[in-house]
């Protein structure tokens, strides 16, 4: 789950992490009033959407007077902000963060994430923070360094100091950086984050360290432990079909192709998309119904896939382990009759009760094409969609 910048900073503030004073607003008059409350300018006016790259896209601006804050906020509300992370469709700005400005002397990058290669949390840092961090990662990756954290000890003082010295901090900033980094790590672990990113971490001309921007992503599987964080979810920032899928415990991500996919298991779903592309097709979605899908979930999966107007065909690829093939076949038949599938439908079943499942599909009277193996299924659906 993602949250907005102002929400991330509120969480960080609760863990003792230094962040600028600011307030989220929903109209331009409130933006001006809060600028006055925050004290003397300048102020940063920042569009709040679930995407990075806002600065380059015009979503972050500096104002010198309260009236200028009002005018900038007015221009942002309702605008469609297009960044490298939103896609060409962009995101509509519905809320704005007004924040006290600071005198920036230097910018740095710090993040924490789960490293699957080491099965540990890894701290990433670079002295090249700011809007061009992606370019730094692509062209000069040696400027980004890593620190693997032992879960038994957490981020030690020694490691925090090592990172601080690598960033080039002088002793006064090292003294600030150690507790700051440890507070960030504590936030990451205790809030069950999957990503915590500070970009930029700034050193002000007064010599203070400040987290000027923050991004927090959370492990959905742990949200039952964090009800307050779960309530921060902004449904306006999410794909309506992905929201609908989550209500039925379906893992769904919309893509740009025209072949809908319904698969059980994330790995099999990825392989299914790969083999569709191998045969010249383009997947329209990632959809994992899980290992124990019910008839209701299969039906809802069909409804979600068909609600995408780009879908011109559907490939169902099921390996019946925990889930038996005859149960899936029942779900497919029930769903196809309820929803009224009007596009080509290719089904590949394998595993427990596969023969019974195939027999049920063949005797259903529905226009379902059975496939033997993934390659056969992909070839048939691509051919059907391409005419």
Image (tube, helix red, strand yellow):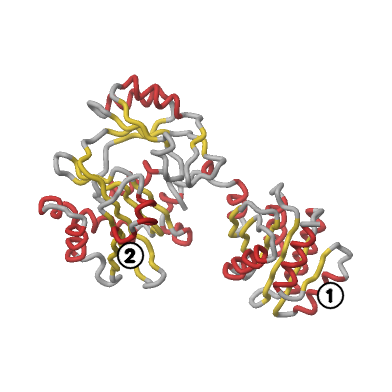
Label 2 – label 1 distance at C-alpha: 51 Å
Q: Residue at x 52, y 39 (%)?
A: 91
Q: Which residue is mark 1?
A: 359
What kind of element bears circle 2?
A: strand
Q: Earlier in the sequence, mark 2 or mark 1?
A: 2
Q: Position of residue 232 (x, y in %)?
A: 44, 46
Q: Which residue is mark 2?
A: 122
Q: Is 337 placed left or right of 116 in the picture?
A: right
Q: Position of residue 219 (x, y in %)?
A: 44, 59
Vertical order, 323 against 382 (above or below)? below
Q: Position of residue 289 (x, y in %)?
A: 64, 64
Vertical order, 15 against 364 (above or below)? above
The quadrant of the picture occupied by the C terminus is bottom right
Q: Nearer the viewer, residue 135 or 73?
A: 135
Q: Residue at x 28, y 68 (%)?
A: 149
Front label number (2 vs 1): 2
Q: Nearer the viewer, residue 230 or 215?
A: 215
Residue 118: name its quadrant. Answer: bottom left
Direction left: furthest residue:
171
């Amino acid at each position: 789950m993602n949250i907005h910048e102002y929400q991330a900073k509120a969480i960080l503030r609760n863990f003792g992490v230094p962040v600028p004073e600011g307030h989220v607003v929903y109209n331009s008059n409130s933006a001006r009033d809060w600028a006055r409350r925050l004290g003397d300018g300048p102020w940063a006016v920042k569009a709040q959407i679930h995407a990075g790259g806002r600065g380059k896209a015009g979503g972050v601006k500096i104002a010198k007077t309260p009236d200028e804050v009002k005018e900038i906020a007015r221009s942002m509300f309702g605008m469609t902000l297009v960044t490298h992370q939103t896609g060409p469709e962009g995101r509509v700005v519905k809320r704005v963060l007004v924040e006290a400005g600071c005198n920036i002397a230097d910018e740095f990058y710090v993040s924490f994430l789960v490293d699957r290669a080491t099965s540990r949390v890894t701290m990433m840092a670079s002295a090249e923070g700011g809007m061009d961090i992606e370019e730094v990662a692509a062209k000069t990756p040696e400027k980004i360094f890593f620190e693997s954290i032992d879960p038994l000890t957490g981020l030690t003082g020694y490691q925090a100091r090592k990172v601080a010295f690598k960033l080039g901090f002088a002793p006064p900033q090292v003294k600030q950086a150690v507790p700051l980094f440890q507070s960030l790590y504590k936030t990451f672990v205790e809030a069950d984050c999957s990503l915590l990113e500070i970009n930029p971490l700034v050193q002000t001309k007064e010599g203070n360290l400040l987290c000027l921007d923050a991004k927090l992503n959370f492990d959905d599987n742990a949200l039952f432990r964090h009800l307050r964080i779960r309530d921060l979810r902004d449904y306006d920032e999410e794909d309506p079909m992905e929201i609908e899928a989550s209500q039925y415990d379906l893992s769904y991500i919309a893509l740009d192709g025209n072949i809908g996919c319904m698969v059980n298991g994330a790995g099999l779903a990825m392989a299914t998309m790969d083999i569709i592309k191998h045969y010249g097709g383009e997947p329209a979605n990632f959809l994992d119904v899980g290992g124990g899908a019910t008839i209701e979930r299969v039906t809802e999966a069909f409804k979600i896939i068909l609600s995408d107007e780009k879908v011109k065909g559907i490939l169902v690829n099921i390996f019946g382990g925990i889930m038996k093939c005859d149960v899936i076949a029942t779900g497919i038949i029930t769903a196809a009759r309820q929803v009224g599938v009007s596009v080509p439908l290719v089904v590949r079943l394998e595993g427990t009760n596969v023969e019974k499942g195939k027999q049920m599909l063949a005797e259903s009277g529905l226009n379902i094409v059975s496939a033997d193996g993934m390659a056969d299924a992909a070839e048939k659906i691509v051919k059907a969609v391409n005419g």
